[in-house]
Image (cartoon, rainbow, N blue to C red):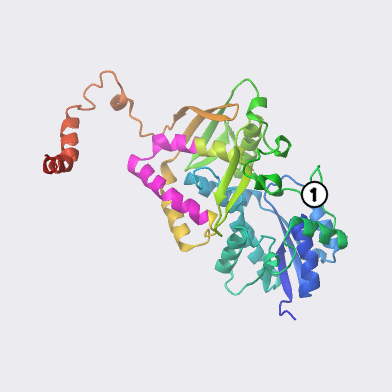
């Protein structure tokens, strides 16, 4: 008999967590609290409440929280201040949502007196690590129930059979039959895994993509977009001030319209395997391009290069679940310090899958000096003769070594 009396389940209402809810009731005989996060996944969340009620969850134990502003303001924007990309391509849309979900799971556990949390991450995936590292950092004594590490329902077909046997409704079955894609969506991205994507030779189905048109089907006319930054965060689009969630929502709409942000990636998972996924991150792709553009005129060269040196480490910390770690917090402090001067605007051209920077400026913090950079007469602002001494000093060690290597 388990000593867990109450558990908080991260509950989407989809196939995996619907099965888990019933499985927890049958195998742990404990009170279940469900938590459904609205991170901007674009789906109706009320069905999750109705499913929970159907399986006997008390109304006061059903949490459906709108976390969209917190998600973008406190997680997505801080990540993009570092221009974060994992393995050169992945914008970490799934990874960055997990620390917020873990935080809220622990908040609810404390509010309700629960000793345990539970999640639907598989034993093969990264999310189990992200959820649990976050939970232990925030509530060291918490118990974690990970059904995928305990049960024998180790395929999506077995999950569907279990759902049918227990009268658990399942939506989003694939139109051609069989299990649906494994999907994750929030305001930053939507991901797809499973089915024929498990064969790296197979091209993704055109009908799979949900947020973006193909670049071939995008409008023939380019669209211009003005993006305004304050301390590294976007605060306005085309002169209209918006909240963080509104910014990302609008950028997703524009990027999707122009076929921006599709990615087919084989990534190296934390648990050691290679895994293929397809991603749509239209808004994030635009943010990254615009942010690097405004930094190009507002950051000192060595500060910018230091940030670039640190970024892969920062990206790995997020990917591997260390958002709440001391080292990530220290890195964030350094990154945020660099952003105090990242103020100004960038003009972008969106066209058939491309984000093209066409202009940028900062009235208060630009380090671009036209009198020095000009190819015309600079009036003595820059002494070109200085370059000779600089070059000789930097070449000195190589000249010495070169003499020793003479034959």
Answer whether residue 30 is visible to the viewer in this image.
Answer: no
- Quick one: 141 or 379, which is closer to the camera? 141
The percent position of residue 217, horizontal first and vertical second, equals 67, 26
Position above or below: 69 against 381:
below
Magenta stretch, overall SS: helix
Q: Is residue 130 magenta?
A: no
Position above or below: 167 against 113:
above
Q: Residue furthest top?
A: 376
The percent position of residue 264, horizontal first and vertical second, equals 60, 41
Magenta stretch: give its range. Answer: 290-318
Residue 211, quarter of the rendered image: top right
- Quick one: 177 or 285, which is closer to the camera? 177
- Quick one: 373 or 91, which is closer to the camera? 91
Decide: few, some or many residues near mark 1? Use Cα within 10 Å; few <14, some 14-19, many ≥20: few
Question: Is 270 placed left or right of 170 in the picture?
Answer: left
Residue 155, quarter of the rendered image: bottom right
Residue picked out by circle 1 = 178
The percent position of residue 255, horizontal first and vertical second, equals 62, 33
């Amino acid at each position: 008999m388990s000593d867990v009396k109450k558990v908080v389940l991260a509950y989407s209402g989809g196939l995996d967590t619907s099965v888990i809810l019933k499985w927890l009731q049958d195998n742990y005989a404990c009170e279940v609290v469900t938590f459904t996060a609205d991170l901007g996944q674009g789906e109706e969340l009320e069905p999750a409440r109705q499913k929970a009620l159907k399986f006997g969850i008390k109304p006061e134990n059903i949490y459906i929280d709108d976390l969209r502003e917190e998600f973008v303001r406190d997680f997505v924007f801080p990540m993009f201040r570092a221009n974060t990309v994992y393995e050169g391509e992945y914008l970490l849309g799934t990874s960055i949502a997990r620390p917020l979900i873990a935080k809220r799971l622990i908040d609810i556990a404390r509010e309700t007196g629960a000793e345990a949390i539970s999640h639907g991450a598989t034993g093969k995936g990264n999310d189990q690590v992200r959820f649990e590292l976050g939970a232990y950092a925030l509530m060291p004594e918490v118990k974690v129930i990970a059904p995928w590490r305990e049960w024998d329902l180790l395929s999506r077909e077995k999950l569907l059979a279990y759902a049918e046997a227990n009268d658990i409704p399942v939506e989003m079955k694939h139109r051609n039959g069989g299990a649906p894609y494994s999907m994750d969506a929030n305001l930053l991205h939507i991901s797809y895994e499973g089915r024929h994507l498990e064969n790296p030779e197979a091209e993704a189905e055109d009908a799979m993509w949900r947020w973006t048109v193909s670049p071939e089907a995008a409008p023939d006319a380019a669209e211009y977009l003005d993006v305004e930054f304050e301390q590294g965060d976007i605060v306005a689009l085309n002169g209209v001030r918006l909240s963080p969630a509104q910014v990302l929502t609008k950028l997703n709409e524009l990027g999707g319209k122009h076929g921006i942000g599709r990615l087919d990636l084989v990534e190296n998972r934390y648990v050691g395997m290679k895994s293929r996924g397809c991603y749509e991150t239209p808004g994030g792709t635009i943010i990254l391009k615009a942010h690097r553009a405004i930094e190009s005129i507002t950051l000192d060269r060595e500060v910018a290069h230091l940030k670039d040196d640190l970024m892969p480490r920062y990206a790995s910390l997020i990917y591997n679940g260390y958002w709440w770690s001391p080292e990530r917090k220290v890195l964030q402090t350094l990154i945020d310090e660099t952003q105090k001067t990242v103020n100004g605007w960038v003009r972008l051209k969106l066209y058939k899958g491309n984000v093209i920077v066409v202009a940028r400026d900062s009235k208060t913090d630009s380090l671009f000096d036209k009198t020095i950079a000009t190819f015309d007469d600079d009036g003595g602002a820059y002494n070109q003769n200085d370059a000779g001494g600089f070059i000789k000093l930097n070449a000195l060690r190589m000249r010495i070594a070169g003499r020793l290597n003479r034959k």
